[in-house]
Image (cartoon, grey):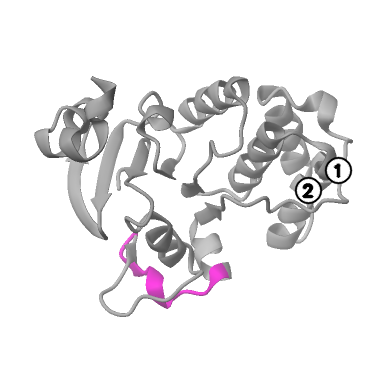
């Protein structure tokens, strides 16, 4: 999985996307084989060790603390990992809130945020953890079209500093953001290439994308 790129993991429901993501994130164990991350055995690491190594997972389900404000949610993960919010991290939080157009929402409790605002906040949290790679599980699910466009712009902006891995079953949602596509079918790797290469592949057309042409 290349760094400095956005890679999309696509496939129909049941293709194995979420299972693979949970194995990478450490939420489920693998039965055989191994997972390597910068030549380290990722499958032997705890959740904390994976995060410290630079791999962070953003689940499809809301993972924010409902009764904390947006900014408090950001500060909480920084404190958990780095023990305190340094001046540098505080400046980074303010800068990211500005980039995400969330500065006017900073003091609002997360339970009152829209789906798009919550998703942007979750992405911000993973960036604040000094991630090398971010795993985004169905990042556009339950998000309004305007927020989807904003999230796509944000991901493109930050990809120069980290690798972004998106799992989704809707090709339309990710074709404009991904540099590379990995297509799964029934738990196996079917194709890997640029969005156009995958979209125009005869097998992929037959299975998934025929209606887009």
Residue indicated by mark 2? 73
- 66 left or right of 96 in image: right
Q: Residue at x 13, y 33 (%)?
A: 201
Q: Residue at x 32, y 46 (%)?
A: 11
Helix, strand or loop under label 2 = helix
Q: Position of residue 170 (x, y in %)?
A: 40, 36
**Pointers 2 and 1 in contact (C-beta within 8 Å):** yes
Q: Which numbered tag is attached to residue 69? A: 1
| Magenta span | 38-47
Q: Characterize the local packing of mark 2: few (<14), some (14-19) or many (20 or more) Cα atoms within 10 angstroms.
A: many
Q: Position of residue 176 (x, y in %)?
A: 38, 23
Q: Nearer the viewer, residue 17 or 78?
A: 17
Quadrant, the C terminus = top left
Q: Position of residue 86 (x, y in %)?
A: 77, 47
- Compared to residue 124, the image places residue 96 above or below, namely above
- 142 left or right of 162 in image: right
Q: Residue at x 51, y 69 (%)?
A: 27
Q: Which numbered tag is attached to residue 2? A: none
């Amino acid at each position: 999985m290349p760094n400095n790129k956005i890679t999309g993991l696509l496939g129909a429901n049941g293709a194995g996307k979420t299972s693979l993501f949970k194995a990478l994130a450490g939420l489920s164990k693998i039965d055989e084989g191994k997972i390597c991350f910068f030549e380290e055995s990722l499958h032997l690491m705890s959740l904390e060790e994976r995060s410290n190594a630079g791999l962070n997972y953003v689940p499809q389900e809301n993972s924010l603390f409902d009764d904390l404000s947006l900014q408090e949610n950001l500060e909480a993960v920084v404190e958990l990992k780095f023990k305190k919010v340094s001046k540098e991290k505080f400046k980074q939080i303010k800068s990211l809130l500005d980039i995400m157009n969330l500065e006017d929402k900073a003091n609002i409790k997360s339970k009152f945020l829209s789906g798009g605002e919550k998703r942007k906040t979750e992405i911000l949290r993973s960036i604040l953890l000094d991630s090398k790679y971010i795993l985004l599980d169905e990042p556009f699910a339950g998000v309004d079209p305007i927020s989807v466009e904003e999230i796509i712009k944000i991901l493109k902006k930050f990809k120069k500093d980290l690798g972004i891995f998106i799992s989704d079953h809707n090709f339309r949602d990710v074709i404009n953001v991904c540099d590379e596509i990995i297509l799964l079918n029934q738990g196996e790797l079917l194709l890997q290439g640029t969005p156009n290469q995958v979209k125009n592949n005869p097998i992929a057309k037959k299975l998934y994308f025929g209606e887009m042409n």
